[in-house]
């Protein structure tokens, strides 16, 4: 009987093979190829990172003002003090009096003269040779030293199996045609160079990841991702889905819905509906993302798609991430469809057991033609009779597994339903190109007539009383307002006003007006009652947390105050302020912030004050947060691109797309090898 060996710290980091170690590339480098005397080091100027060496002549542990170790070294030119605020007994031993050590760090002015705080220390002989290449600094987890990773990487680079793993198999002709005149490094040369760059390497290009060696690695990684996405696109086209032709009769549900609408479709809505209509006629599943800024009218386009499917005797489902948003869709769709005789089912986690069972029975029997709800729709207990279309709103809030195609057997064949994703968080072009190769994108780039632009103002929290005074005169005109807070309960650490506190303060300050409170911890029926009262103008001021971020539509509410706006991200504020500007009154959003402001928060608030274009805001959001967060935490793309920056490397994305098309068409035998090298099992996630 063999005992199972515990995984090493390197294995826990995923560094379990020579290839994994080879691709664990440095995050930065230290130059240990140059050595200064202590006198030269002191003359280099403060805050310069230098390397020097000497003999330890003093080592003492002090306990005031806090426990620390002071070490003094000297050479033939001068002495230098080293200060350690955290240290181990092994370090005391390493730097015992008489030891010869080599140190590296920034010289700063201390209480007793120049010093280095927490230098890198190595015990060496006085004549120990200097390295000839820059010293890599690797991403590491707690308990794993740089020395351990460096040693493992050096061994991996010498491993004979790595020669096969990094073998050059991309056709040279393809590479030179893509970048004529560019002398591409081989992949093996690029990786060796990045682990052990020579002392004269361009450190700026290495750090910014624009060096030719980085470019080769980035291209390979992007190529793997694009191949995987394009293959997923091809696989989807081989799947079967019901085909929904345009109705020929004038009295179709689709035609009746258009006639019954109290407004005419905008040009942009008509255009995207034409694109979706075209997809629904195909016999393979639609996979389309419908983007549109807050209030652009995505819901009516989704309703038309549902009408087409119901016309053909199939069911349509609309799923939203929050109960408030799902309920908003339910009320809107009910208003449009019930007069036309469509049977609608509502399903959410908060329904009582009996109501839930009734809805599930209606869905399973096919009695419910249109089903609206939260993620409760994709639980195992829900079985559709004949689902033809799934509309997923705010799609980035659902995990990959939740967005995978809903499939079912109709007769002997396996059918997939058509999918329409909707998002008011615009996806920047570079992000769409890289992560959504298997997703067709439609954009509603025009607001419905009558939508007023929103004026955004940035105000200090010290002017709170002034804001409340302005709020009073606003409400006196018969208009309504939102007051948004970031927290429900007091947090001593953050010292933020809470929704409950603000509610109490505003209730006292505005005795002539009804103030309501809604937050995530209210029961669903309580939340619904408050929202209904606000919509009916029985409540004039709604104090809320971000539960009102999406799905709330009250045209008479034309003012929004966002408290502690510095705590919110770009997309969140843009979504929130989209709740106003829905009626005929001029609308205002006040971003109230507490000082001091960080540079990032200052820039964010300034941008939001000046910019109303959701795509511009999304680009800024991407540069700050990265693709994984923008698409949804731990989504399909997150972690797929380890070495690529979507904005810096946008030009490489187009090259990788062209190369992927060529490889799939002309070198199908190389595709599997390339995917296995870069993605392994992770390629499956890109099909979501």
Image (cartoon, rainbow, N blue to C red):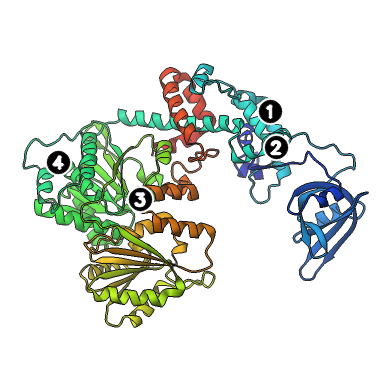
**Spatial CA span between label 3 and label 2:** 49 Å
| In the image: residue 477, left or right of residue 342 | right
Question: In which quadrant of the rendered image does the N terminus lie?
Answer: top right
4 or 3: tag closer to the N-terminus: 4
**Spatial CA span between label 4 and label 3:** 40 Å
**Residue that numbered label 2 is attached to:** 152
Question: In which quadrant of the rendered image does the C terminus lie?
Answer: top left
1 or 4: tag closer to the N-terminus: 1
SS for dot 2 = helix
**Spatial CA span between label 2 and label 4:** 62 Å
The x, y position of residue 431, in whole percent, is 42, 41
| In the image: residue 480, left or right of residue 158 | left
Q: In which quarter of the view is residue 137 placed?
A: top right
Q: In the depicted view, which residue is nearer to us: 170 or 607?
A: 607
**Residue that numbered label 1 is attached to:** 159
**Spatial CA span between label 1 and label 3:** 53 Å
Mark number, residue 613: 3
Query: What's the residue at 84%, 48% (across, down)?
Result: 40
**Spatial CA span between label 1 and label 4:** 62 Å
**Residue that numbered label 4 is attached to:** 313
């Amino acid at each position: 009987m063999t005992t199972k060996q515990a995984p090493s710290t390197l294995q826990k980091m995923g560094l379990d093979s020579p290839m994994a170690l080879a691709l664990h590339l440095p995050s930065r480098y230290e130059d240990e190829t140059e050595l200064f005397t202590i006198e030269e080091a002191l003359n280099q100027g403060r805050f310069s990172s230098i390397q020097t060496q000497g003999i330890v002549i003093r080592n003492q542990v002090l306990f005031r003002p806090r426990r620390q170790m002071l070490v003094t070294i000297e050479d033939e030119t001068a002495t230098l003090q080293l200060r350690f605020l955290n240290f181990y007994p092994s370090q005391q031993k390493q730097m015992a009096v008489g030891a010869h050590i080599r140190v590296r760090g920034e010289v700063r002015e201390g209480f007793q003269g120049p010093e280095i705080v927490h230098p890198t220390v190595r015990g060496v002989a006085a004549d120990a040779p200097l390295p000839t290449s820059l010293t890599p600094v690797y991403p590491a987890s707690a308990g794993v030293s740089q020395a351990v990773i460096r040693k493992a990487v050096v061994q991996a680079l010498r491993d004979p199996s790595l020669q096969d793993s990094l073998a050059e198999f991309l056709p040279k002709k393809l590479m030179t045609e893509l970048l004529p005149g560019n002398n591409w490094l081989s992949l093996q040369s690029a990786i060796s160079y990045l682990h052990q760059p020579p002392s004269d390497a361009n450190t700026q290009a290495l750090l910014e990841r624009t060096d030719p060696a980085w470019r080769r690695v980035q291209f390979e990684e992007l190529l793997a991702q694009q191949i995987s996405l394009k293959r997923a696109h091809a696989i989807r086209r081989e799947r079967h889905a019901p085909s929904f032709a345009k109705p020929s009769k004038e009295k179709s549900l689709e035609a009746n819905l258009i006639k019954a609408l109290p407004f005419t479709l905008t040009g942009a809505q008509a255009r995207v509906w034409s694109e979706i209509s075209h997809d629904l006629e195909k016999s393979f599943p639609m996979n389309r993302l419908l983007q549109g800024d807050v209030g652009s009218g995505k819901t009516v386009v989704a309703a038309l798609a549902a009408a087409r499917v119901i016309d053909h005797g199939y069911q349509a489902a609309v799923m939203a991430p929050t109960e408030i948003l799902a309920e908003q869709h339910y009320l809107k769709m009910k208003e449009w469809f019930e007069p036309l005789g469509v049977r609608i089912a509502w399903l959410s986690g908060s329904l009582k057991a009996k109501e839930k069972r009734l809805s599930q029975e209606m869905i399973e029997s096919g009695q419910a033609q249109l089903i609206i709800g939260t993620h409760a729709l994709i639980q195992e207990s829900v079985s559709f009779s004949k689902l033809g279309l799934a509309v997923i709103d705010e799609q980035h809030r659902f995990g990959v597994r939740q967005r995978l195609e809903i499939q079912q057997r109709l007769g002997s064949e396996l059918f997939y339903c058509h999918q329409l994703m909707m998002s008011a968080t615009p996806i920047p072009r570079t992000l769409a190109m890289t992560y959504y190769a298997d997703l067709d994108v439609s954009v509603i780039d025009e607001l419905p007539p009558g939508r007023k632009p929103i004026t955004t103002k940035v105000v200090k929290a010290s002017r709170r009383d002034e804001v409340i005074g302005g709020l009073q005169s606003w409400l006196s005109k018969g208009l309504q307002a939102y007051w948004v807070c970031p927290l429900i309960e007091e947090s001593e650490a953050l010292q933020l006003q809470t929704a409950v506190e603000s509610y109490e303060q505003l209730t006292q300050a505005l005795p002539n007006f009804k103030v309501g409170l809604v937050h995530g911890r209210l029961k669903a029926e309580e939340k619904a009652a408050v929202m209904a009262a606000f919509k009916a103008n029985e409540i004039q001021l709604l104090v809320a947390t971000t539960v009102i971020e999406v799905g709330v539509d009250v045209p008479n509410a034309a003012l929004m105050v966002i408290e502690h706006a510095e705590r919110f991200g770009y997309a969140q504020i843009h979504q929130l302020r989209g709740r106003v500007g829905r009626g005929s009154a001029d609308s205002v959003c006040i971003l109230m912030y507490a000082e001091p402001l960080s540079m990032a928060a200052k820039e964010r608030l300034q941008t939001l004050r000046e910019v109303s274009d959701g795509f511009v805001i999304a680009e800024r959001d991407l540069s700050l947060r990265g693709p994984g967060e923008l698409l949804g935490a731990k989504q399909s793309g997150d972690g797929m691109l380890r070495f690529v920056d979507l904005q810096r490397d946008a030009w490489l994305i187009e090259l990788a797309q062209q190369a992927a098309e060529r490889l799939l068409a002309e070198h199908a035998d190389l595709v599997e090898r390339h995917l296995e090298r870069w993605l392994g099992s992770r390629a499956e996630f890109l099909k979501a």
